[in-house]
Amino acid sequence: MDISQIYLGFQTALTPLNLLFCAIGVTLGQIVGILPGLGPAAAIALLLPASFSLPSETAIIMLAGVYYGSMYGGTITSVLLNVPGESSSVVTCLDGYQMARQGRAGPALGIAAFGSFIAGTIGTITLMLLSPPLAEVALKFGPPEVFSLMALGMMALTIFVSGSILKGLSMAAVGVIIGSMGMDIISGRPRFTFGIHELMDGIGFVPVIMGLFGIAEVLISVEEMEKTKVFDTTIKDIFPTRQDWRESFLPIFRGTAIGFSLGILPGSGGVIASFASYAVEKRISKTPEKFGTGVIAGVASPESANNSAAAAGFVPLLALGLPPTVVMALLLGALLIHGVQPGPMLFQAHPRVVWGVIASMYIGNVMLLLLNIPLIPLWVRCLKIPYQILFPLILLFCLIGSYSLNYSVIDVGFMVLFGFVGYLMKKCKYEPAPLILALVLTPMLENALRQSLIISRGNPLIFFQRPISLGFLVAAFCLLLLPIFSFFRKRRTELLEQSDSS
Amino acid sequence: MLMLSKVNILMKRSTRYDRWSSLVLFLLGASICYGSVNLGLGTWSAPGSGFLPFGAGLGLSLFSVGIFALPGTKRESAPSVTEKFWPRPESGKVVSLVLLSLIVYDLIWTRLGFSLTTFLFLVFLFRVIGKRKWWITIMGAAVISGIAYVLFQIFLECRLPTGFVGF
C-alpha cells in the first residue's frame, strides 16, 4: 500500500466541498435509515440525479455516505419502534426493543453507535489494505474470467437475496433483457427499440431504479398508511456504562470480523452478517436463554457486523467492478454515469476518486458518531413525520430526478411504468435486486462474452479451459445447487407427509 | 400415476399469483426469443446482436415454466388464494389514484410548467390521499413547490419545464 495514495485520499476528502457533501450524505443516510419504508437503495436512487452537477469524487463520497449512514440510522427504529428502519437492523429489534421496554433505550442506542463507529473504522482500514492487492490480481483477468466473475456475482446475489431461486433467476434474465435494449455495442444495430428514438441508448438506469425502489415502495406504503407509534420512553444515559462496555467489547470485535468476512462475499451484505453475528453471540454466550430479553451484546454485535459489512462491500466493487449488493450496484451505476469505470484499473486511472471515497469513510464515521449520540432526541422526532407528508415529497423527488437525467418525459414515463411493475413484483414476491444487478452488468457481461467467443474462435469451452474462469463457474454452479438440494429435500419430506396422512 | 398425482399436489401449491406472473414472464421470454432470432443470433465465433437477449429470453421462459409448475415455500410464494391482494378495501383505489396522478403529472408538466403542476400534484396528494386539512394542503403545496423550484432550478441548475406560466 502506497502511503502517498492515502495522503492523496485525505487531501481529496478534506476539501471543503467534499467535507460538506460527506456531511450531507451521512446525515441523509441517517434520516433514511430512521424512516421505515425508505431504504438506502431508494435514497441513492433519489439523490443520483442531484449528483450529476458535482465532481465525480464528491458525488460518490455523498452517495457512499448515504449507504453507511443508513446503517447507523436503522438502529433507532429497531430499538424504539420494534420496526427495522433498514433490513440489516432486523435482528437488532430482538434485544434492542426489549432494552427500550426496560428503560434502557439510551445505552442500546449508544452502544450501537459506538459499535458501528468501531466496526466502520476497522472495516475501512481493512478495505484500504485489501482492495489494491485484489485489484492487482484482477488485472490479470481476460474477458473469459471477467464473464465468469460476473456470472458468479449475479448468481450469488440472486440466491442470497431472493426467497425463490426461480424468481430470482427470472428477474436476472429480465435485467439482462432490459440491459441489452438499445444500440448493440459491437454491430451498432438497434435492439428492441420499437422505433422510439429515445430508446437508442437503452432504458436509462435511473428511471428503472427510481421506479423499482422509489415509486414501488410508495405504492406499497400508501396501501396502509397508519400512524407509527414511537415507544414512549425517555432517552437517557446514552453513554454506555463500564459494565455495558465489558459486555459489549468482544461482541463488537467479533461482529466486526464476521461482518467484514461475510460482507465481502457477493450477495450477502449486512443482513446475513447481522444475523450470523447474533447467532454466534448467542451460541458462545454462557446465558443464551437471555438473548431476546434485552441483552446488550445482542445489539452491539449485529450493529457492528452490518457496519463492517457495509465497508466490506466496497472491496469487490472497487477492486473487481463487481457489486456484491444492490446498493453497491447502484453505486456502480453512479460511478459509470460519472465516467468512472470500477475494476482493477480504477486505482490507477482514478486514484483521487477511489482514495478520496475511502478516506471520506473515516471522516464520515467520525461525523456519524458526533451526529448520532447528541442528536438522538432529534432523530426520534424524525420518526414522527407523518407518511402522508413524506410520500408526496418522495414522489416529487422521483419525478424531478428521472426527468433531469435527459430532460425527457419518456424517462419519467418509464419510471412510472417500472414503479407499477415493481409494485406488482413486490405483491408477487419477486425481488428487484437481481434485475438491477443484471441491468448494470449486462453491457460489460455481453462485451466479455462476445470477446471471449471471438478470441476462442467460437469455442464456448474457453470458459472452462482457463483455471480462474473455471473456478468462478464451479463456485456459481455450487451456489446454484445449494437451494436446489434444499428444495428437493423439503418437497420429499412434504410429499411423504402428505402420502402418509392420506 | 404416482408421478401425475405428485404433479397435481405441486400444482395445487403453486399460487394463483405465481401462475399469472409466470405466464406473463413466459410470454415476455418467448417474445424476446422471437425478436432475437429476427435480430440475428450470429455464430459461436461471431455472435450476433440477438445472441445474448436470446439466451436471456430462453432462460426466462424456462424459469417461468418452473415458477408455474413448482410450488414455493411459504416464504417465497406470492400471497396464497386466501390472503387478500389489498390489505384494506380502499387500498386499490389509493394506489390507482397515486399512479394516475403520476401519469397526469408527466403528461401536463411540459404544458403547465413545473411550479403550477407540482402545486396541483401536491394539493391532490395531500388532500385526497393524505386527507390533510385545506389550509395545510394549500400552504404545504405552495411552500414545497417553491422550495423545489429554488433547489432544483436555481441551485442544481436543472432545466425544469417552464410551460405557459414561464416557471
Image (spheres, coloured by chain):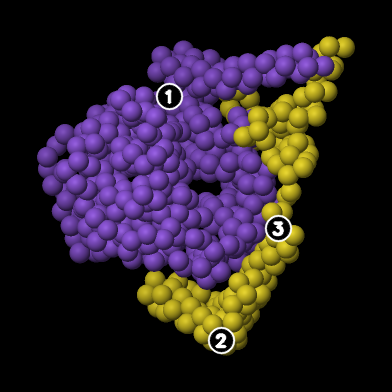
Chain colours: A purple, B yellow
At label 1, counting other C-alpha atoms closer than 10 Å, the crowd grade (few under 14, some 14-19, many 20 or more) is: many
Q: Are marks 2 and 3 on the same chain?
A: yes
Q: Are marks 3 and 1 on the same chain?
A: no
Q: Residue at horizontal 41%, vertical 75%? A: B151
Q: Residue at horizontal 49%, vertical 29%? A: A156
Q: Is residue A402 visible?
A: yes
The residues tagged by marks 2 and 3 sit, at their Cα atoms, a distance apart of 28 Å
Quadrant position of residue A395: bottom right
Q: Which residue does the numbered mark 3 point to in the structure image?
A: B88
Q: Is residue B113 visible?
A: no
User: Viewer-nearest of labels 3 and 1?
Assistant: 3
Q: Which residue does the numbered mark 2 point to in the structure image?
A: B135
Q: Amino acid at mark 3?
A: Arg
Quadrant position of residue A298: top left
Q: Chain of mark 2?
A: B
Q: Residue at horizontal 69%, vertical 40%? A: B78
The residues tagged by marks 3 and 1 sit, at their Cα atoms, a distance apart of 51 Å
Direction front: furthest residue: A102
Q: Chain of mark 1?
A: A
Q: Amino acid at mark 2?
A: Trp
